Image (tube, rainbow, N blue to C red):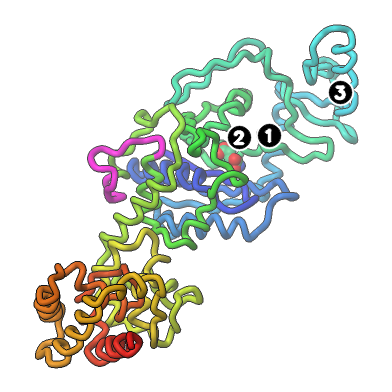
Amino acid sequence: MTGPRLRIAPSPTGYFHVGGARTALFNWALARQLGGTFVLRIEDTDTERNRPEWTQGIIDALAWLGISADDPHFEGPYLQSSYTAQHIAAALQLVESGNAYYCDVSAAEIEARNQQAVDAGSIAQGYGGWSRDRNLGPGPDRVVRFRVPEGTTVVRDVVRGDVEFDNSLIEDFVLLRGNGAPVFMLANVVDDMHMKISHVMRAEEHLSNTPKQQLLWEALGEQPPVWAHLPLLVNEQRKKISKRRDKVALEQYRAEGFLPDAMVNYLMTLGWTPKGPEVQPWEQMESDFRLEDVHLSPAFFDVRKLAAFNGDYIRMLSAGEFLEASRPYLLGPDAGFPADRFDESKFLAIAGHVQPRCITLADAPGVVDFLFLADPVIDADSWAKVFSGAQATAVLRGAISAYESLPDWNADALKSALEVIGAANELKLGKAQAPVRVAITGRAVGPPLFEAIEVLGREESMRRLRKAEAALD
Ligand code: GLU
């Protein structure tokens, strides 16, 4: 791949977040559209918070979204922790060139000096560049600090335009800690440089790091990448979504039965507006996506809208695809019926009527359970409501005798027969269906009744109708 090189650089400190997924998709779309490369770099240098299973979680989450490590545009995963020597070398190069220096002023001393300033009626200024001209060499507990130059730093951001930062407000930040360990700011830049990253597209919260990083690029003698900071994702209260307040783990949506295509499509609309209908195939979004069109204002991560997308995507599946996608739920412990009673052919026969009744795949078992339960429990309220008058009893008895002798057991014939019985009892079809539905499915609502009865089959349907009749006496 010779085109641009983009990347995501997640830290493996928890479940992969929907915001991280949006960033990944935008980068992925552009990398593929431009014939470039999407690099996955795991920033695993925070040894206290990292866990290897989170790294695997990121890889799995990306694969679920269709960002596959097997794709020729994909490169990595690289682990930041394997490049510590390069990070240190870069810091030493900066000391060598005069852009960084050793400092022995401890955190406690910085605090004490600031306190003195406050006591003297001045304001605390953090680290005051006190070791800049002391020409210290390396030594125990000495940190390496970057010498922030005077002037202003202009970050050219494709989304935000030029953002100016006054360098006098940026203190001489640490590059190497007292124990010699590189800090995030340095590692992130050095890795981007070594990995020849051309575009850094990431969440807005990193914008405040960008002037420091740009200064590092320049001091290391390289051209900074194209910067693009994506708008925040906010909740209904317009607060930044967070794992404390909101459901943000991609894994959780996956477990709840959201389809990856629906998730991908929805995430692509957060901060960017697809041309034409919002629900559209990935290929379209991949070719239309432009960084210049990304919005500035925060994007509302609307779970209800995501659910609506998911419902649309469920309806678009073929019966076979729907079966495959729902299988874990249909055969899982929460299905509500024994797995060994599940019958694929029955499910496939009614799938088209089940799909519109599902928001997530986890809804599927509850729509079809009556087909696979030996004896669905009849909902007492529905029963009491439906069989409150004499008409319902008459309809049920009428249905039993008409259905017994029905030559063809199919939805049309079942419907016509019940229409006749309803008319004889002065009931429209909708009303006449109610007692039959409760007897067959146990509930007052569900998929289209006659299709359900056809799929359930003559023998079992007649048994349930007769059982309901017996219960009336
Ligand atoms: N490791 C950083 C994070 O997960 C990524 C920073 C970046 O994308 O440059 O927030």
Count of numbered circles in the view:
3
Residue 123, image x and y in percent?
79, 11
Where does label 2 land, which residue? 189
Name the residue: 73% across, 38% down: 182
Q: On the rendering, which quadrant does ligand 1 occupy? A: top right
Q: In screen coordinates, is 291 left or right of 455? A: right
Residue kind at label 1, given as amino acid type: Ala
Where does label 1 land, which residue? 90
Name the residue: 38% across, 46% down: 305
Name the residue: 43% across, 27% down: 296
**Numbered disc 1: secondary structure:** helix
Q: In this view, does 364 lie above or below 222?
A: below
Dividing the image into 4 quarters, which one contains the C terminus? bottom left
User: Upstream in the sequence, badge 2 or badge 1?
Assistant: 1
Q: In this view, does 37 lie above or below 141?
A: below
Name the residue: 90% across, 21% down: 112
Q: In screen coordinates, is 166 left or right of 103? A: left
State the extent of the magenta-drawn residues as a range: 270-284
Label 3 Cα crowd, 10 Å radius (few <14 / some 14-19 / many 20+): some
Residue kind at label 2, given as amino acid type: Val
Residue that protrudes farthest toward the top in the picture: 121
